[in-house]
């Protein structure tokens, strides 16, 4: 009977039934067969409301949606061009930094492709870069911002780790730990871009202090956002939830009353759209934590640990298998769903191998962000295919070189924990 139920639920997942319903059905069936009162399900949802850190999620999401609806992308591109256009391959680093920064602010790499694609693609091709290289760069560069604070995936990972009572996992530490890995990814892709275009003259533009000043003056309000988040949290003046609330209010004021790019009557629509995403995450998180409780009661994590320990003899091999698994998972599953479903299973096993839970969070997100543009079904491949009006096979050819380069950086991040932990531990 259990096998039949599993087959039915797997079929419903394939045909597109919402993920939280599939997880909820698994949880209900598990608790029912174990003769456990189903009241544990609403209790688990209620328990999430006690997490003060989780309060930051809707605030950061609302701020991100506001920024994505404004002309922030235009201002960031102008600023990056004025500051870095004089460098060899300046447009490469401009695309990398602008995309990463925009994803950091909005929390969505797919949004970055849509918002910046129309600006960056013509700028790159006019500068002499091939269309294939330019599309590959834009498609792959936005996801690096998922490691930069206030990174919603890292925030979600921290919430789950704290719900599981895993010691040593603070949101502040996760934010700090992602800085060097994200910077290394940007630098490595920039160097690859220089090498890939080594036979062509790399265009530069004359540096203009006046243009730099004007672009900074134009974008000064957005540039203050990371200062508010990081300064407030790391100074100790604000906890994460406070920083999120301040950020949301600040972004609302600058976009509605300073730039006046979002009309006041449109704010409820932006709020509704952002809360639809947050509601989906919270529903999945609630039912997934309930399912996790059932799996713990059924000793599934212990069975998984015993199986891995019997077949995997050392931490190095475990990390190799983890990288492969996460890359495949990232190509098929959204990063939020993957974190919610897999972290409760993977985290205890990883800790048993002596892997720092903060380091694991960076490894998890770094792998998953590559999964966004990993063939055959990486989500950003389809977004870019629609945005640039190119076939999906053309996107495969454009992004595979960048995927391979970033895979190398992920391996370094995985096997050199110092990069993630040097400013934390």
Image (cartoon, rainbow, N blue to C red):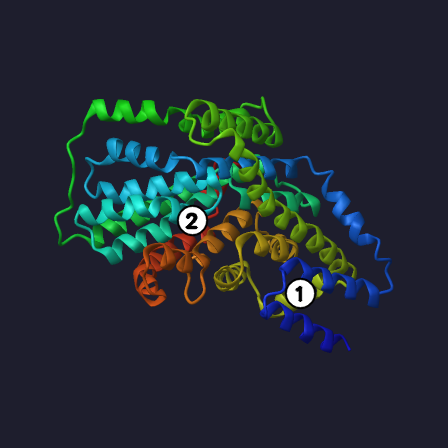
Inspect this view and state whether residue 261 appears. Answer: yes
Q: Could you say whether the residue bearing mark 2 is in a helix, strand or loop?
A: helix
Q: Nearer the viewer, residue 66 or 284?
A: 66
Q: Could you say whether the residue bearing mark 1 is in a helix, strand or loop?
A: helix
Q: Looking at the rendering, which quadrant does residue 382 occupy?
A: bottom left
First-in-chain label (1 vs 2): 2
Q: Is residue 282 above or below residue 12?
A: above
Q: Position of residue 399 (x, y in %)?
A: 33, 59
Q: Nearer the viewer, residue 116 or 262?
A: 262
Q: Position of residue 82 (x, y in %)?
A: 24, 31
Residue drawn 38% across the image and 44% down it? 115
Q: Is residue 345 left or right of residue 185?
A: right
The C terminus: image quadrant: top right
Q: Please tell me whether mark 1 or mark 2 is closer to you in this view.
A: 2
**Residue underneath mark 1:** 304
Residue drawn 42% across the image and 29% down it? 222
- The Cα–Cα distance between marks 1 and 2, rounded to whole angstroms, is 31 Å
Q: Position of residue 311 (x, y in %)?
A: 59, 70
**Residue underneath mark 2:** 143
Q: Residue furthest front?
A: 265
Q: Is residue 258 above or below residue 98?
A: above
């Amino acid at each position: 009977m259990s096998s039949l139920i599993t087959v039915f639920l797997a079929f419903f997942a394939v045909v597109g039934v919402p993920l939280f319903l599939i997880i909820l059905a698994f949880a209900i069936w598990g608790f029912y067969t174990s003769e456990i009162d189903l009241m544990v399900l609403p209790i688990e949802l209620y328990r999430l409301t006690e997490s003060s850190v989780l309060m930051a999620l809707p605030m950061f999401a609302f701020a991100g949606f506001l920024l994505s609806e404004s002309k922030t992308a235009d201002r960031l591109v102008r600023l990056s061009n004025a500051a870095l256009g004089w460098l060899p391959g300046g447009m490469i680093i401009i695309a990398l930094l602008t995309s990463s920064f925009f994803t950091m602010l909005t929390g969505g790499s797919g949004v970055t492709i849509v918002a910046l694609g129309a600006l960056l693609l013509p700028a790159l091709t006019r500068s002499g870069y091939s269309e294939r290289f330019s599309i590959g760069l834009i498609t792959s560069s936005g996801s690096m911002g998922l490691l930069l604070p206030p990174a919603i995936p890292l925030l979600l990972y921290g919430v789950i780790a704290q719900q599981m009572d895993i010691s040593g996992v603070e949101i502040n530490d996760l934010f700090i730990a992602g800085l060097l890995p994200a910077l290394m990814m940007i630098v490595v892709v920039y160097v690859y871009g220089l090498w890939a275009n080594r036979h062509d003259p790399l265009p530069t533009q004359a540096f203009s202090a006046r243009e730099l000043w004007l672009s900074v003056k134009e974008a000064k309000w957005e540039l203050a956002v990371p200062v508010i988040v990081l300064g407030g949290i790391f100074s100790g003046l604000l906890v994460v939830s406070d920083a999120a609330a301040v950020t949301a209010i600040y972004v609302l004021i600058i976009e509605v009353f300073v730039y006046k790019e979002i009309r006041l009557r449109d704010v409820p629509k932006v709020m509704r759209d952002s809360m639809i995403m947050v509601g989906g995450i919270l529903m999945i998180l609630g039912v997934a934590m309930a399912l996790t409780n059932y799996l713990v009661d059924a000793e599934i994590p212990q069975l998984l640990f015993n199986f891995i320990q019997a077949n995997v003899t050392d931490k190095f091999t475990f990390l190799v298998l983890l990288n492969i698994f996460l890359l495949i998972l990232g190509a098929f599953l959204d990063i939020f769903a993957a974190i919610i479903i897999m972290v409760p299973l993977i985290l205890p096993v990883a800790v048993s191998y002596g892997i720092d839970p903060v380091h694991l969070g960076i490894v998890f997100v770094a792998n998953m962000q590559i999964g966004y543009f990993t063939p055959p079904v990486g989500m950003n491949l389809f977004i870019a295919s629609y945005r640039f009006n190119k076939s999906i096979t053309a996107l495969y050819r454009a992004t595979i070189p960048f995927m391979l380069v970033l895979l190398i950086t992920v391996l370094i991040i995985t096997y050199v924990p110092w990069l993630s932990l040097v400013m934390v531990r």
